[in-house]
Amino acid sequence: MNTDSNQIPLFTASNLCKSFHSGIKKIQILDGLEFSINKGEMMAVVGASGSGKTTLLQILGTLDTPDSGELLFEGDNLTAKSDGELSKFRNKSLGFIFQFHHLLPEFSAIENVMMPGLIAGKKKDEMEEPARKLLEQVELSHRIEHRVNELSGGEQQRTALARALVMKPSLLLADEPTGNLDAKSGNLVFELIKSLCGDLGLAAIMVTHNQKLARQMDSIFILENAVLTQQSHS
């Protein structure tokens, strides 16, 4: 994926391994995974249920640790950092969006979008305008003050997308972000992610079962039998 030999990739996974134990049996989840992604690129990870896709995304998001291997962000080794350093890294550089939106029901759309900044210690006045602009970008300017239960499933997921981007991350990690939506809403969420990647120079790694969406991304990787293999678009 990295076409310029002089360019350091935004994000690189090198020889990632992860296993679990069930009784005395060792279950290999990831075995020597390798890939890199540059700014503005979209990467799909496709695989059967239980193949380890979510575990992979948690490791890439530094929410879980590999047994061995390295994660490099702009050449900086994340696997050598402390928990406190990783927490700051996630808040500054990563955005997360999941199959289920995980919005806070007692707050409005704009309050949910502002939340990552407020948690990071920023003031409400500082976060309100970026949150408002993002909600406009995801076509929810008319729903800004609505509470979560007043939004449709597609609107909730678009709010979650705005929340994931409000801290201006460099990398978006998406775990089946369209999997809980009807086809029309799912396509809209995907097109918004694709558009924002282009506009913001954002890289995105998306776990999906949807081969149609996967074929619209820059690269497709299949996770099967603990091995990640790049697939052609043909």
Image: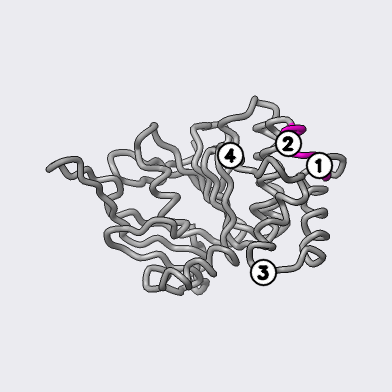
Instruction: Name the residue beneath numbered marker 4.
Output: 177
Disc 1 or 4, which lies upstream in sequence? Answer: 1
Mark carried by residue 155: 2
Mark 2 or mark 3, which is nearer to you? 3
Is the residue marked by circle 3 packed among few (<14), some (14-19), or many (20+) residues within 10 Å? few
Asked which quadrant contains residue 127, the reply is bottom right
Q: Report the Cα–Cα distance between label 1 and label 2.
A: 7 Å
Q: Report the Cα–Cα distance between label 1 and label 3.
A: 26 Å
Disc 3 or 4, which lies upstream in sequence? Answer: 3
The local secondary structure at tag 1 comes to: loop
Disc 2 or 3, which lies upstream in sequence? Answer: 3
Residue at (42% x, 44% y) in the render = 54
Residue at (70% x, 58% y) in the render = 166
User: What kind of secondary structure does the magenta stretch mostly adopt?
Assistant: loop
Horizontal and vertical percent position of residue 101: 61, 40
Magenta-drawn segment = 144-151
Residue at (47% x, 71% y) in the render = 84
Q: Are marks 2 and 3 in contact (CB under 8 Å)?
A: no
Instruction: Name the residue beneath numbered marker 3.
Output: 121
Horizontal and vertical percent position of residue 182: 64, 25
